[in-house]
Image: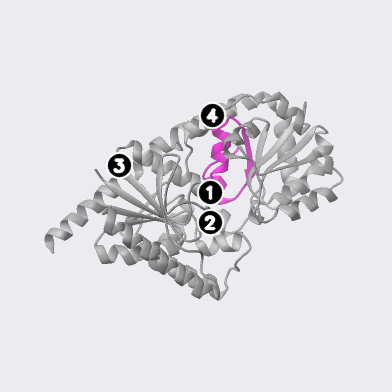
Amino acid sequence: MTRILHVLDHSLPMHSGYTFRTRAILRAQIAKGWDVRGITGRRHSAGGPDVEQVDGLTFHRTPGDPATGNAVVREWRDLAAHADAIDALVRQWRPDVIHAHSPVLNAMAAQRVTRRHGIPMIYEIRAFWEDAAVGNGTGTEGSPRYWLTRQLETRAVRNADAVAVICEGLRGDLVARGIDPAKIIVSPNGVDMTQFGTPVPRDPALTASLGLGGADVVGFIGSFYDYEGLDDLIAAMPRLVRARPRARLLLVGGGPMEQALRAQAMASPFADHIIFVGRVPHDQVEHYYAQVDILAYPRKAMRLTELVTPLKPLEAMAQGRLVAASNVGGHRELIEHGVTGTLFAPDNPAAIARSLADMFADRAAWDERRRVARAFVERDRNWSSNIVRYEPVYQNLLTRSSRDRVAA
């Protein structure tokens, strides 16, 4: 039985797009009959035992709290601790392949171990760490730290035996850096249809409690980061309400921008049309999807959003919801304008309001668009089919590894 060790930043029971993609990959690989485990670094902040079973998955933890002090020194110490934990698990469990997931510190920690033990490694990039830092407000494009992180990323990719990326945008960027295209596979974001494939009916009691009876409901369900453009969505509400007086905006989730967004909404002349729910348990999220007519994703135009595809629009399509999103590269890989969703100009509240108003005015087209969008997810973005993209890569790595051992 093939043993795959996934090297991770964090995992369940923490909830994020990162952990849900990880869960989908591991569950699908277990269904293939592979023996699969994960190991997280010190940035996994949920308490728990050193070896933890979550949702039928096994995760090992790197012991100790995140280091303190200078950022570079702190990250280097955390990397060293993660490498030591990976090495100990490799000696005990003897995996056949190591599958390291971004950020790049995980790849660097894993590569210390793979060189020592002669284990092949695939490095999976979900976003470039330097661009993610810019997107969440902790970094600046063009800064020395940005440049250094970019160099580390390129070096890790060159040293990996194979590379997976979640979208064509990331693949194109690596090829432009001189990485051999034959080394890279695209394993796109997908939806676990066992989790999101059966939409629940709208709960009348929840509708009443939210004050959404008879409303035209626009919604966002996810994390409140600056790059998500939720300030533009709130700024679009006066125009939308003037065109559609019953329009309501439902915001479910939380994050770094929450307080600023709440303050912006309170200052809006249509504050009573904007509803903040806060974070909800993951097993309740589908009930909030059921309250929404159109899921809006107004991501701002920047390197992160041009290169990286999000997961949330796919979940919305699987839930049978309409999708409207900004016309950035990451969304264009998922959404065909006028077919599976609507694209509007980024960073433009007027364009957001106009597109949403037009969608509400054309309800006759809704059923067909929902059907086509869900069919796209089932056919092209379903994890049960996406997982086959890894299999030939693993087999090639194992064959090469076996041949190298014989040659030695």
Measured in 3D between alpha carbons, the distance from the residue under mark 3 to the one under mark 1, in whole angstroms, is 24 Å
Q: Which residue is mark 2?
A: 45
Report the magenta residues as a range.
311-337
Q: Residues within 10 Å of mark 3 (few under 14, many from 20)?
A: some
- Secondary structure at badge 4 equals helix
Q: Are marks 3 and 1 in contact (CB under 8 Å)?
A: no
Q: Earlier in the sequence, mark 3 or mark 1?
A: 1
Check disc 1 and give the amino acid type: Met
Mark nearer the viewer, 4 or 3: 3
Q: Residues within 10 Å of mark 1 (few under 14, many from 20)?
A: some
Q: Which residue is mark 3?
A: 34
Query: Residue 127 at what x, y percent from top left?
Result: 50, 56
Residue 241, relative to residue 310: is it above or below?
above
Q: Are marks 2 and 1 in contact (CB under 8 Å)?
A: yes
Check disc 2 and give the amino acid type: Ser
Q: Which residue is mark 4?
A: 372
- Secondary structure at badge 2 equals loop
Q: Earlier in the sequence, mark 1 or mark 4?
A: 1
Q: Going by the image, does 136 lie left or right of 273? A: left
Measured in 3D between alpha carbons, the distance from the residue under mark 1 to the one under mark 4, in whole angstroms, is 32 Å
Residue 70, relative to residue 237: is it above or below?
below
- Secondary structure at badge 1 equals loop
